[in-house]
Image (cartoon, helix red, strand yellow):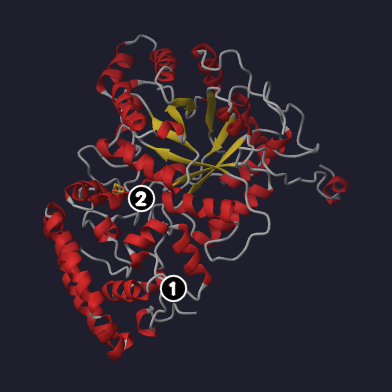
């Protein structure tokens, strides 16, 4: 919901704190998740994530969440899906070029980031979205990634993207993931 | 052309030399900028035609004053001849060109392939753009792609150039030698964040910046002050966008219909009050160029004179920004080798 989304950005600092807690919890749970099997919990966790983040941030489940680097303003709500800041068409008053009744997602993002403790992450250059991961759980991806450390991916393309976008890899590991993806995390029909 | 000629192989053989030391591409624009001279680039109005003569005709009024000519990529989401086609033609005729890539129409596979293609054709400058939404163009029913954004595009081409790999990690045997450009719009919101955004573009790989139209010098000066605070003017060449306004009506139309254009009321009034609005628009443009040239950190101007291309050389000459320098260009036609702008040595710059 647009209203709730604006609220979340206004309170970006609180959500940043909440998110940091959530993340460390998820990372701590990695051994448990690994024992149950990431593939098994993928669907249910993704459903919970979709419901929560959908309500709070109008989350589009790109699977590569960068909210903590974008002032808690989801970049996938930008009609151009820009992951790196506003386009040149922002209207007077900070409204969107494409949807004039909506505040520009990136104007909100920079404002939100300014209120955050770690807001400078908005300066990291984010890689393009891996469209295969759409619909999968970003939370699980983060715990997998943090736990997997900096192990190089088997796929050359993932290694190249992680190397080409090092800041994003360090701060938002889901944006440039390296760990092996369970089959359940990949969009049906997109895994060839 | 008779049949005989058509069957002959292409009479030119492109070479693919390494850039001179300290350069990433060796393009004329890069050499002019790195030698500390004030550069001029100009935007070409792409033809709705398949005839190469129309491209050369459109380039003619720009070539004598511009170090490089921008070929827009369906700007405003309106369909015209492609930027890569125009750049290929102009490069073969010895002009410096800037190949514009918008993320709106093509995905990462198409774009990376085109970058190699353009480099092979001799193109040495590329401008990475997000692109206007499809809704403002002549075919609003098209599918907007936006697979990459301008920054991930910059980083992608930089990776191709400097690491010699595609984003897939596959090796490129001869990497594309490209001088990487990006756009910035200093006069539209969020004003406070625009310099930070510029910093991010530099971080992503930009070597030069071309800004959108500057009609509001005080706002631009504030932007540049912040840019200097961040030390960015030492890491990237900034070319400020300028252009003549034809009339007050045209200015108002642009302001409300073209995304990202800020024109202060005072500017429009000045043109409205004048007896000869077009003359006044030209004068204004010249004055803006002279003011902008004095702002520390500005490395050049980018002239966008849509449908007024014939005025460009006069505007540049009268503004005096070139200080008597004549951007070199080849006057000979298309068929001689060596090919590409690398073949041309600008006056006063030692050869590689
Ligand atoms: S104005 Fe903002 S939200 Fe709208 S397309 Fe541009 S960057 Fe995206």
In which quarter of the view is residue B170 placed? Answer: bottom right
Numbered label attached to residue A151: 1
Q: Is residue B37 left or right of residue B18?
A: left
The mark found on residue B163 in the picture is: none
Q: Nearer the viewer, mark 1 or mark 2?
A: 1
In what element is the residue under mark 2?
A: helix
Percent position (x, y) of residue B349? 67, 25
Place of residue B83 in the rendered image (x, y in percent of width and height, measured from the top left)? 56, 44
**Image quadrant assignment for residue B234:** top left
Compute the Cα span from label 1 to label 2: 43 Å
Give the residue at x 73% y 26%.
B331
Residue B327: horizontal and vertical position, in percent? Answer: 63, 23
Q: Is residue B133 above or below residue B168?
A: above
Quadrant of image for the N terminus of chain B: top right
**Residue density around tag 2, few if under 14, some if 14–19, many if 20 or more, within 10 Å:** some
Q: Chain of mark 1?
A: A
Question: A166 or B3: nearer the eye?
Answer: A166
The residue closer to the viewer here, B5 or B314, is B314
Q: Which mark is residue B135?
A: 2
Taking the image as drawn, is residue B144 in sight?
A: no
Number of numbered callouts drawn: 2
Q: Residues within 10 Å of mark 1 (few under 14, many from 20)?
A: few
Q: Please, is residue A56 above or below residue B334 in the view?
A: below
Q: Residue furthest right?
A: B4
Label 1 in the same subunit as label 2: no
Instruction: State which quarter of the image contains the C terminus of chain B.
Output: top right
Query: Secondary structure beneath disc 1?
Result: loop
Q: Chain of mark 2?
A: B
């Amino acid at each position: 919901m647009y209203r709730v989304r604006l609220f979340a950005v206004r309170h970006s600092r609180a959500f940043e704190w909440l998110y940091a807690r959530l993340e460390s919890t998820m990372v701590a749970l990695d051994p448990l998740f690994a024992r149950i099997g990431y593939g098994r919990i993928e669907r249910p966790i993704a459903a919970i994530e979709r419901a929560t983040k959908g309500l709070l941030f109008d989350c589009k489940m790109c699977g590569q969440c960068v909210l903590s680097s974008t002032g808690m303003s989801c970049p996938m709500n930008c009609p151009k899906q820009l992951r790196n800041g506003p386009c040149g068409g922002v209207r007077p008053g900070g409204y969107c070029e494409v949807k004039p009744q909506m505040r520009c997602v990136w104007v909100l993002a920079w404002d939100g980031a300014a209120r955050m403790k770690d807001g400078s992450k908005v300066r990291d250059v984010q890689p393009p979205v891996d469209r295969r991961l759409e619909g999968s759980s970003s939370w699980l991806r983060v715990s997998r990634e943090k736990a997997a450390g900096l192990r190089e991916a088997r796929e050359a393309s993932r290694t190249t993207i992680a190397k080409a976008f090092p800041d994003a890899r360090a701060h938002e590991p889901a944006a440039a993931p390296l760990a092996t993806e369970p089959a359940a995390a990949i969009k049906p029909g997109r895994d060839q | 052309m008779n049949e005989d000629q058509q069957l002959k192989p292409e009479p030119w053989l492109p070479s693919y030399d390494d850039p001179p030391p300290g350069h990433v591409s060796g393009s004329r624009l890069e050499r002019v900028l790195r030698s500390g001279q004030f550069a001029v680039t100009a935007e070409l109005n792409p033809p709705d035609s398949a005839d190469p003569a129309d491209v050369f005709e459109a380039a003619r009024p720009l070539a004598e004053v511009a170090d490089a000519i921008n070929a827009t990529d369906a700007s405003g989401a309106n369909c015209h001849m492609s930027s890569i086609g125009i750049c290929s033609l102009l490069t073969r005729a010895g002009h410096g060109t800037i190949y514009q890539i918008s993320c709106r129409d093509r995905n990462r596979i198409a774009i990376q392939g085109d970058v190699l293609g353009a480099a092979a054709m001799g193109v040495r400058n590329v401008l990475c753009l997000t692109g206007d939404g499809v809704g403002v163009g002549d075919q609003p029913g098209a599918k907007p792609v936006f697979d990459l954004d301008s920054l991930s595009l910059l980083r992608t081409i930089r990776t191709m150039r400097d690491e010699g790999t595609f984003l897939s990690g596959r090796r490129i045997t001869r990497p594309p030698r490209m001088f990487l450009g990006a756009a910035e719009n200093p006069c539209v919101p969020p004003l406070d964040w625009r310099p930070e955004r510029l910093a991010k573009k530099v971080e992503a790989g930009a070597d030069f910046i071309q800004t959108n139209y500057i009609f509001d010098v005080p706002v631009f000066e504030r932007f540049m002050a912040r840019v200097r605070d961040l030390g960015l003017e030492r890491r990237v060449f900034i070319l400020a966008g300028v252009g003549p306004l034809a009339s007050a009506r045209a200015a108002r139309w642009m302001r409300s219909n073209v995304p990202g254009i800020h024109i202060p009321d005072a500017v429009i009034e000045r043109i409205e009050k004048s007896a000869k609005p077009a003359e006044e628009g030209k004068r204004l443009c010249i004055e803006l160029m002279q003011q902008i040239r004095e702002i520390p950190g500005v490395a050049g101007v980018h002239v966008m004179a849509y449908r007024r291309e014939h005025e460009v050389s006069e505007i540049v000459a009268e503004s005096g920004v070139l200080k008597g320098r004549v951007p070199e260009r080849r006057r000979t036609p298309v068929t001689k080798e060596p090919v590409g702008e690398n073949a041309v040595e600008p006056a006063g710059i030692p050869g590689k």
